[in-house]
Image: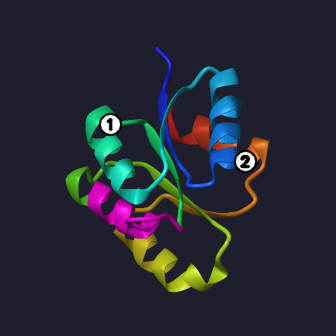
C-alpha cells in the first residue's frame, strides 16, 4: 500500500512539481495551498508525512504545524522555507516535535530522501 504524503505549498508550480515527483515514485499525494487547508486535510487523511512551506496564507506553516502536533503528537512534519528570518520559529517548532527544517529550493533527491526516510 503506498504511503501518503501531504504537500502544502501556495506556489502552484512548486506544488505540482513536488506532487509529480512523489507520484512518479509511487507515493499517494494529498495537497493543500494554505495552512488552514493543511490542518483540515491532515485530520481527514492522517498522512505518513507532511512537507509544508513555512510561509503560507491563512495560517503559516508553523501555526499549522502547531495545530497538527497538538492533535497528533506522532505527526511527521517537515517545514520547507526560503526565509532564514524564521529561525526563532524553527527553533520553537523543532522543540515541539517538528522533524526537520529544509531550505528552499528543495531538490528532487532531497524530497525523495525525506519521503523514504520518514514514511517507512
Disc on the earlier residue, 2 or 1: 1
Nearest the viewer among 58 and 115 is: 58
Give the residue pinned by disc 2: 110
- SS under mark 1: loop
Could you tell me if the residues under marks 2 and 1 are in contact, i.e. CB atoms within 8 Å? no
From what the image shows, is residue 55 above or below residue 22?
A: below
Image x and y of residue 48, in percent: 43, 36
Residue 46's disc number: 1
**Type of secondary structure dominating the magenta stretch:** helix
Q: Is 113 left, or right, of 67 in this rendering?
A: right
Nearest the viewer among 85 and 100 is: 85
Q: Within 10 angstroms of label 1, few (less than 14), some, or many (20 or more) residues?
A: some
Q: Is 4 left, or right, of 96 in this rendering?
A: right
Image x and y of residue 23, in percent: 63, 25
Q: Is 59 contained in the magenta span? A: yes
**Is residue 25 in view?**
no
* The residue stretch that appears in magenta: 55-69
Front: mark 2 or 1: 1
Image x and y of residue 70, in percent: 23, 60
Q: Which residue lies at the image location 28% right of the left edge and 61% below the top edge?
A: 67
Q: Quadrant of residue 96?
A: bottom left
Q: Is 85 left, or right, of 46 in this rendering?
A: right
From what the image shows, is residue 106 above or below residue 61?
A: above
What residue occupies the far left of the structure in this picture?
71
Q: Is 39 left, or right, of 89 in this rendering?
A: left
Amino acid at each position: 500500500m503506498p504511503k501518503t504524503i501531504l504537500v502544502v505549498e501556495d506556489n502552484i508550480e512548486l506544488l505540482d512539481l513536488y506532487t509529480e515527483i512523489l507520484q512518479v515514485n509511487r507515493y499517494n499525494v494529498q495537497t493543500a495551498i494554505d495552512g488552514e487547508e493543511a490542518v483540515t486535510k491532515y485530520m481527514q487523511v492522517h498522512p505518513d508525512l507532511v512537507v509544508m512551506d513555512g510561509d503560507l496564507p491563512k495560517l503559516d506553516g508553523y501555526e499549522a504545524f502547531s495545530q497538527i502536533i497538538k492533535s497528533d503528537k506522532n505527526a511527521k512534519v517537515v517545514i520547507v522555507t526560503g526565509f532564514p528570518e524564521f529561525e526563532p520559529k524553527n527553533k520553537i517548532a523543532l522543540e515541539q516535535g517538528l522533524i526537520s527544517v529544509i531550505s528552499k529550493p528543495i531538490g528532487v533527491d532531497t524530497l525523495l530522501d525525506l519521503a523514504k526516510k520518514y514514511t517507512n
